[in-house]
Amino acid sequence: MLRQIKPRTARSKRVLEKRAPKAVENPKNALFLRGTTCSQITQDAIGDLYALRQVHAKRFHKKNPVHPFDDASSLCFFSEKNDCSLVLFASSSKKRPHTITFARTFDYKMLDMLEFSLDPETFRSISQFKTKKVPVGTRPLMVFAGTAFESTVTNEFTMAKSMLIDFFRGEPSDKIDVEGLQYCVVVSADEPTNNNRDDPSSKPVLHLRVYLIRTKRSGQKLPRVEVEEQGPRMDFRLGRMQEPDEAMLKEAMRKARTSEERTKKNISTDIMGDKIGRIHTGKVDLSELQARKMKGLKRERDPHLLDDDVDTSAMMDGPPKKKSDEKTKRKRI
């Protein structure tokens, strides 16, 4: 059972209310950490990622003796202290050089983790691109290209797609201004080269590129769109991963019930505002249907059948009877 904390001051009460579960959650904050050994290239990489996520991000520069896949309790502690559900941990070692570990937490408990190995030869920082930079807090367009992201089974590439979407999502909004779409994040994956899955060199490489969107006059109604790379330029190879627990993932994906009326099946409303329902029944045998007897439901007799009935009745009764005497007297008079 979770420990209930009672606020003692108004400030602590506001903090607890801000962290409490909501029907519409706050935008996720990202926390940037570094290990005891971290190369300069890895520090520059997380610095560029921090610049893209600067509004909802925190960065610590001190060294932390943390090994996420061995013991993630330290990352959970930092996540709870700083109210950050996304954690990026940069480290570098002889066995795993230039590594960035993406981690997500739910209820300040570790949900899943994935390791990104940065290629130092192809890395280019934002400062190396002499282009105009986008304003802070701008939401990007996202493009994922490659068959590796289309897998129906959960693997490291589908997890990488989910984590990158969470990282670049920002604040949710109902309406989008076209003028606010100023840059695009493109993540592409190469095709696998060998059938040997155990060989890390055979895994597809992830290419992360950030492009600035420019609209120019085209002489038509729609403008001409051009893109220009603004950085950073990163190439990753995916390493170790920790899949989420099924029960925790189900709890994290659950949506709160709102006051909005849910749509009911087979019930609709017409133009006049009347409610119309559709009922699905099985096959009905009309021969066994018992209907109420009434004159209006009787079927009419066929006139040909009536004539035949008259003829047969006449034959059965014998010769026709003579007319009454009164009629004969009237004729005589």
Image (cartoon, rainbow, N blue to C red):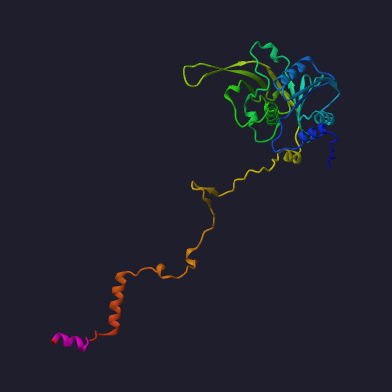
Image quadrant for the C terminus? bottom left
Q: Give 131 or 280, whichever is nearer the viewer.
A: 131
Quadrant containing the N terminus in the rendered view: top right
Q: Residue furthest front?
A: 10
- Give the percent coordinates (x, y) of residue 46: 75, 20
311 in relation to 298, above or below: below
x and y, in percent, of residue 229 in the image: 63, 16
Report if residue 326 lies within the magenta region.
yes
**Residue 202 within the segment the image draws in magenta:** no
| Rendered residue at 65%/33% (across/down) | 151
Q: Is residue 266 left or right of residue 194?
A: left
Q: How many marks?
A: 0
Q: Tell me where residue 75 appears, x and y as whole percent.
A: 82, 29
Residue sticking out furthest to the left? 333
Does the image show residue 22?
yes
Q: Residue at x 53, y 51 (%)?
A: 275
Segment colored magenta: 323-331
Q: Is residue 181 left or right of residue 73?
A: left
